[in-house]
Amino acid sequence: MIGRTRGHGANMRFLYGSVFFFFVIIITIGLFAYYSLYKHWNKPGDARFSYEISFSPSFAGKAYDVYLNDSLVYAGAPVNTDTVLRINRFATDNALLVVDKASDGVSILQIPDRGKIGLNLVNGTVTTVIK
């Protein structure tokens, strides 16, 4: 007699169960991969913007070094009052260091997460104006 044997039904149930389990595992892996990439792309405080730092006219003719955290981003005297530095943000908390080359005076400025930053020179002290 050719046809179904006693073990055929058990084999089919095992096959269907294995296929179902395989699809559940694939869907679970896909969800984990999607959520990990989604959180990576859209995490708060992401460094997707840049700072715009502008100099006031009081900096004209004076040599300064500008550091963002520990990286030198500008050295020398601003060419004119329209000098604007555009720097990509690369850390969550950033500090701006402005060093006067003539007197080696250092001004440490905490800069905000967003916005344009204007640098003013008042009596040898550098201050910021958030625009």
Image (tube, rainbow, N blue to C red):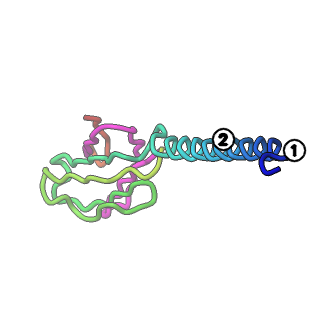
Q: Position of residue 89 (x, y in %)?
A: 38, 50
- For image coordinates 29% across by 60% down, the residue present is 64
Q: Which residues are magenta?
A: 93-121
Residue 12 or 48: which is nearer the viewer?
12
Q: Is residue 131 left or right of residue 43?
A: left
Residue 15 or 52: which is nearer the viewer?
15
Is 50 located above or below residue 99 in the figure? above
Residue 3 or 34: which is nearer the viewer?
3
Q: Is residue 27 left or right of residue 117?
A: right
Instruction: Work out which residue is located at the far top of the displayed protein and give it.
Output: 131
The residue pinned by badge 1 equals 6
- For image coordinates 39% across by 54% down, the residue present is 68
- For image coordinates 83% across by 43% down, the residue present is 10
Secondary structure of the residue carrying tag 1 is: loop
Q: Position of residue 126 (x, y in %)?
A: 31, 46
Residue 2 or 47: which is nearer the viewer?
2
Q: Position of residue 78 (x, y in %)?
A: 19, 58
- For image coordinates 29% across by 35% down, the residue present is 130
Reply yes or no: does residue 22 show up in magenta. Answer: no
Quadrant for residue 28, please give it: top right
